[in-house]
């Protein structure tokens, strides 16, 4: 295959907003009197907002406690907490190696996209001042099926004008790796807690990203 595009997840790949997701869910859980810790938070990586809340309810034996409308409202309340917290993001919060890696890829004619299920992705990229590094940013509001479904990665590939096997996906979550593989792409896993499918390229951190190494893998 000839590499034409790189498709990045956001949280845990471009920046670490996971801590803000954790703090926002923790705040909501505390208000509701539910248990929530980092182990539960790990299960929410790459999962949609409403499905994340469902996991928290399940862990607290409270699945039937709220109506669908109430669940949606509470999940949105968490998102408001999160949006307040991320306003403190700056370019200093970009993960190590990301900007040089993307810059080198682009200088070699590689297109780049962001495949995040977060509706806040455009604002995060704006705060980090890296939105201009990407040729396409998926609109999470239009994605009907969350990861591990391949929809968002396939959407990015189509928007960039390339076949899935011409793209490489970069993720930090198991659900994201499954999504990439289902889309028919090569996967790069950043510190992934592997519970099923292994990433094709396993890295401990974004600092290990090397364009030539990834290109050679293809």
Image (spheres, rainbow, N blue to C red):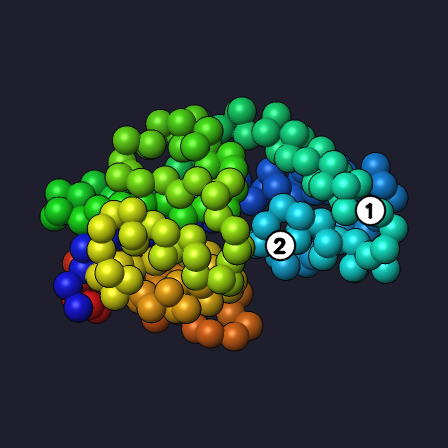
Q: Is residue 32 left or right of residue 135?
A: right
Quadrant showing the N terminus: bottom left
Of residues 91 and 152, the one drawn nearer to the viewer in this rendering: 152
Left or right of residue 136, residue 79 in this image: right
Q: Residue at x 68, y 36 (%)?
A: 76
Task: Name the spot of residue 127 as percent of width and height, x first.
Answer: 43, 26
Instruction: Return the residue nearer the eye: 187 or 146.
Output: 146
Q: Is residue 165 left or right of residue 58?
A: left
Who's the residue at 72% across and 41% down the image?
72
Q: Position of residue 79 (x, y in %)?
A: 64, 35
Label 1 to label 2, Cα distance in Å? 21 Å
Camera-near label (1 vs 2) is 1
Q: Which mark is residue 67?
A: 1
Query: x%, y% of residue 213?
Result: 20, 62
| First in residue order: circle 1 vs circle 2 | 2
- The quarter of the rendered structure image containing the C terminus is bottom left
Asked whether residue 201 is in view, the answer is: no
Q: Secondary structure at mark 1?
A: loop
> Crowding at label 2, few (<14), some or many (≥20) Cα neighbours within 10 Å?
many
The image quadrant that residue 154 belongs to is: bottom left
Residue designated by label 2: 44
């Amino acid at each position: 295959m000839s590499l034409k595009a790189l498709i990045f997840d956001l949280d845990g790949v471009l920046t670490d907003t996971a801590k803000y997701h954790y703090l926002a869910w923790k705040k909501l859980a505390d208000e509701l009197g539910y248990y929530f810790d980092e182990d539960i938070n790990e299960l929410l990586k790459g999962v949609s907002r409403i499905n994340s809340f469902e996991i928290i309810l399940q862990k607290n034996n409270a699945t039937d406690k709220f109506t669908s409308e109430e669940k949606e409202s509470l999940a949105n309340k968490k998102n408001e907490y999160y949006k307040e917290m991320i306003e403190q993001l700056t370019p200093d919060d970009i993960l190590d190696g990301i900007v040089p890696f993307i810059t080198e890829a682009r200088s070699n004619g590689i297109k780049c996209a962001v495949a995040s299920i977060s509706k806040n992705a455009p604002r995060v990229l704006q705060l980090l001042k890296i939105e201009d590094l990407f040729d396409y940013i998926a609109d999470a509001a239009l994605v009907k099926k969350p990861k591990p479904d391949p929809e968002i990665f396939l959407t990015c590939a189509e928007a960039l004008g390339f076949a899935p096997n011409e793209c490489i996906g970069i993720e930090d979550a198991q659900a994201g790796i499954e999504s990439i593989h289902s889309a028919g792409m090569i996967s790069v896993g950043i510190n992934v807690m592997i519970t099923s499918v292994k990433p094709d390229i396993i890295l401990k951190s974004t600092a290990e990203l090397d364009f030539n190494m990834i290109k050679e893998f293809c």
